Image: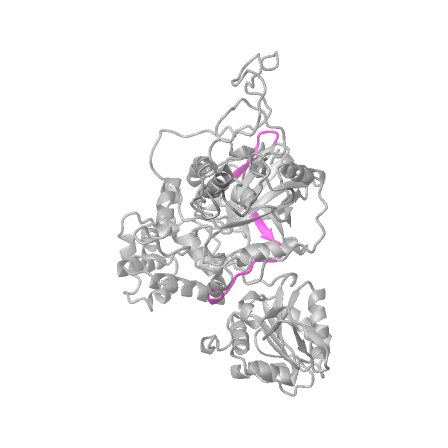
């Protein structure tokens, strides 16, 4: 696979606020220039040879230069995150569109002219740091806002709900999901016994399972996935009025996924697929953008939703409470050092600013403890906030002192408060109106280790999600359940799971069960198991269009188009079309059997971007097959070229064949016919055109329109395609 490209775009112009964070980071940045020294600044006389007793003698223990270098190397790794270990990140900024003062006093949500610097980390959940990007998994979407009132972290996922309702079950969930402890397999995969054993015994997981078995768990790009805060939070305005709020990130490029077969192949061919995609987009100046949306509910009216707003396994349908778009997020700078920034950044849902507060969601409440504890383990102690990537841009002052890796040099004799010795006046904060104010929520009693009955509906929203999917999306969900459960060795686990699915949709459950060698789904058996709940919430919403990904993209900017050629290609058959794609913002790459150049039919030399052997069809969004009798004949004799075309077809990508290029589709039963100059579409997303009879602009318009559909899931004869 290719190396990530170096930046070809001009550095982004930074606002004063964003520049403040970059200046802070630059103070801790070291260039790779200068004379070689030890860590103590001593000049190194020879960096190829250790100190020995003679040229062929033993190495001497006194070689402190060798020992320093080896010792540092031995301690370079820190514990990886237990979950979200595999991540990629970028710098950028956030701007609010209009003041949000009626709902929150948060300063960064008031001034449309203010650009708040941010650092955003995307991640998979289950796999280790060296696992592949395109596995079936939830994706983390964590945003650190460096505000003038302190750091605010919105630590979410690309799915708006979660597997469990109470944090006490989080260790069990992760232990079940991770590689099984007796043999350490499988890596970054949920298709194994322990995971499905756990979730089949936890019906509250059903809604989340519908999402993870959908294409939401196979994003085409980090730039093409939504983000969600998952939990319910509170906005608090200057008057102390509270509103519940749900956070949404809406990508400007639309929401799109990969085919399952494609995702598996990418994991083998380019495990850094998402990381590379994000890096190259920013390096090329195609800065990813999302809009921040909120669903706001008046406190006291949350009961009208029909479910408990504190339940993290539930979402608020957008058809019930529309999402208000309030700002935008732009990522415009790649990190300078992966370890120092992406690996050492420390997120925490408890990093708040005035005007934003928690709810009593029991999963969120547990996260408030867990994240600090994790950073203490990973980053060596209590001073992780002093690492450059974690440092606030606003003044930080308190009397916390010492600890491992302390960076600040605190002057004076006091390390306590209140005090009078620090400044000569009494230093104390006694309940004033300044700073963060917790919402004065009345609390019920007595203490109890029980769950509210309002959390007991585990299936209604799973059904809502299923009903909201397109026919193709439903097919993908069924296939995903079948694949995952086929990897489960214990039949009783498979049976329990399909019995639970009967409460989502009986036809879904029956289809999933059909090839698994078990009995038909039995809803009554599920109801008889311990822990089963079947409380039905009152809701008038049976489906919600926002839950489906079956929506076209607004444009084709940054979409990657392969142009397959060989010697004898007819340059005139595709030159204008290629330019139209570039003008629309697409990225076009010329693919040929070998690197270097090919000769066109007119005798010119055409530069090649990638060889077939190193750049398969799974790296592209669409395929253009130009004309040229010799070129097409040569490609038709190459198994790699034929496979390239068939695989792109099977993965439902847009294919456009010009003139003789249509012959590469003959094995699929398609042929260019004399049709009076019309662009033919024999099956969705396959375009055949004669550039000698059809205007190039017309071909380009049809091709671009087809690419905006992302994929053509209703394509003919997919099962018969040998790719």
User: Which quadrant of the figure has residue 110?
Assistant: top right
**Residue 293, placed above or below residue 110:** below
Quadrant (top left/top right/bottom left/bottom right) for the N terminus: bottom right
Q: Position of residue 34 (x, y in %)?
A: 65, 42
Circle count: 0
Q: Position of residue 299 (x, y in %)?
A: 52, 37
248 part of magenta stretch: yes
Residue sitting farthest toward the front: 54
Which residue shows up at 64% across the image and 85% down it? 629
> Can the viewer see residue 101?
no
How was this image coloured? one colour
Compared to residue 242, the image places residue 497 above or below, namely below
Given residues 112 and 563, the one toward you in this image is 563
Please report the bounds of the magenta region as a residue range: 233-262
Q: Is residue 45 left or right of residue 112?
A: left
* Residue 662 vertical position relative to residue 586 in the rendered view, above or below: below
User: Could you tell me residue 222's position as x and y percent?
Assistant: 56, 54
Would residue 718 appear left or right of 25 to someone viewing this image?
left
Q: Nearer the viewer, residue 235 or 395?
A: 395
Residue 124 visible to an observer of this rendering: yes
Magenta segment includes 411 = no
Q: Nearer the viewer, residue 30 or 685?
A: 30
**Occupied quadrant, residue 17:** top right
Position in image of residue 379 (x %, y %): 48, 37
Q: Nearer the viewer, residue 118 or 69?
A: 69
Q: Residue at x 51, y 56 (%)?
A: 547
């Amino acid at each position: 696979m290719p190396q990530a490209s170096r930046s070809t775009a001009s550095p982004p112009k930074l606002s004063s606020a964003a520049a403040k964070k970059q200046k802070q980071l630059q103070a801790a940045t070291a260039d790779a220039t200068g004379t070689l020294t030890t860590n103590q600044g001593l000049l190194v006389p020879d960096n190829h040879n250790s100190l020995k007793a003679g040229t062929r003698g033993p190495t001497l223990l006194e070689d402190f230069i060798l020992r320093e270098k080896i010792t540092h190397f031995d301690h370079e790794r820190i514990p990886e995150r237990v979950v979200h270990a595999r991540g990629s990140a970028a710098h950028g900024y956030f701007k609010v569109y209009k003041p949000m003062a009626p709902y929150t006093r948060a300063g960064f949500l008031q001034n449309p002219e203010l650009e708040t610097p941010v650092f955003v980390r995307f991640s998979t959940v289950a796999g280790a740091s060296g696992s592949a990007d395109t596995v079936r998994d939830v994706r983390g979407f964590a945003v650190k806002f460096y505000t003038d009132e302190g750091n605010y972290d919105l630590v979410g996922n690309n799915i708006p709900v979660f597997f469990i309702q109470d944090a006490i079950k989080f260790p069990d969930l992760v232990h079940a999901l991770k590689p099984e402890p007796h043999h350490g397999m499988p890596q970054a995969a949920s298709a194994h016994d322990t995971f499905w054993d756990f979730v089949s015994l936890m019906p509250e997981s059903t809604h989340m399972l519908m999402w993870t078995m959908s294409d939401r768990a196979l994003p085409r790009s980090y730039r093409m996935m939504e983000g969600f805060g998952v939990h319910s939070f509170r906005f608090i305005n200057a008057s102390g009025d509270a509103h519940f709020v749900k956070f949404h990130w809406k990508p400007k490029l639309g929401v799109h996924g990969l085919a399952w077969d494609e995702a598996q192949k990418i994991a083998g061919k380019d495990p850094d697929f998402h990381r590379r995609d994000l890096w190259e987009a920013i390096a090329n100046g195609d800065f990813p953008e999302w809009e921040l949306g909120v669903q706001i509910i008046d406190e006291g009216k949350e009961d009208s939703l029909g479910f408990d707003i504190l339940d993290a396994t539930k979402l608020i349908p957008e058809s019930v409470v529309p999402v208000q778009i309030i700002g935008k997020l732009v990522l415009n700078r790649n990190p300078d050092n992966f370890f120092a920034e992406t690996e050492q950044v420390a997120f925490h849902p408890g990093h708040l600013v005035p005007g934003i507060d928690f709810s009593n969601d029991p999963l969120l409440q547990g996260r408030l403890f867990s994240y600090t504890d994790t950073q203490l383990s990973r980053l060596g102690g209590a001073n992780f906030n002093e690492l450059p990537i974690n440092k606030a841009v606003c003044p930080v002052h308190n009397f916390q002192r010492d600890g491992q890796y302390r960076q600040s040099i605190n002057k004076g004799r006091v390390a306590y408060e209140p005090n009078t010795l620090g400044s000569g006046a009494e230093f104390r904060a006694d309940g004033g109106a300044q700073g963060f104010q917790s919402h004065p929520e009345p609390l019920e009693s007595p203490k109890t280790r029980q769950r509210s009955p309002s959390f007991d509906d585990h299936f209604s929203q799973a059904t809502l999600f299923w009903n909201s999917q397109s026919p193709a999306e439903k097919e993908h969900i069924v296939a995903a359940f079948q694949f995952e459960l086929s990897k489960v060795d214990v039949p009783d686990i498979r049976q329990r799971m399909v019995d639970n699915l009967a409460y989502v949709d009986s036809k879904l459950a029956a289809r999933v069960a059909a090839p698994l060698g078990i009995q038909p789904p039995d809803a009554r058996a599920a109801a008889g198991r311990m822990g089963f709940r079947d409380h039905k919430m009152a809701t008038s919403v049976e489906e919600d269009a926002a839950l489906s990904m079956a929506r076209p993209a607004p444009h084709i900017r940054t979409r990657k188009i392969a142009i397959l050629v060989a010697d004898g290609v007819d340059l005139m058959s595709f030159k204008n079309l290629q330019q139209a794609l570039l003008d629309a913002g697409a990225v076009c790459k010329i693919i040929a059997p070998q690197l270097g150049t090919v000769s066109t039919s007119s005798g010119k030399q055409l530069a090649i971007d990638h060889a077939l052997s190193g750049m398969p069809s799974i790296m592209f969004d669409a395929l253009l097959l130009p004309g040229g009798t010799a070129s097409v004949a040569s490609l038709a004799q190459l198994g790699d070229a034929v496979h390239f075309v068939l695989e792109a077809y099977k993965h439902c990508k847009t294919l456009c064949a010009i003139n003789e290029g249509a012959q590469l589709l003959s094995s699929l039963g398609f042929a260019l016919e004399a049709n009076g100059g019309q662009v033919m579409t024999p099956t969705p997303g396959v375009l055949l055109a004669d550039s000698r009879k059809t205007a190039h602009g017309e071909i380009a318009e049809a091709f671009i329109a087809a690419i905006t559909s992302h994929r053509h899931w209703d394509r003919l004869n997919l099962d018969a395609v040998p790719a």
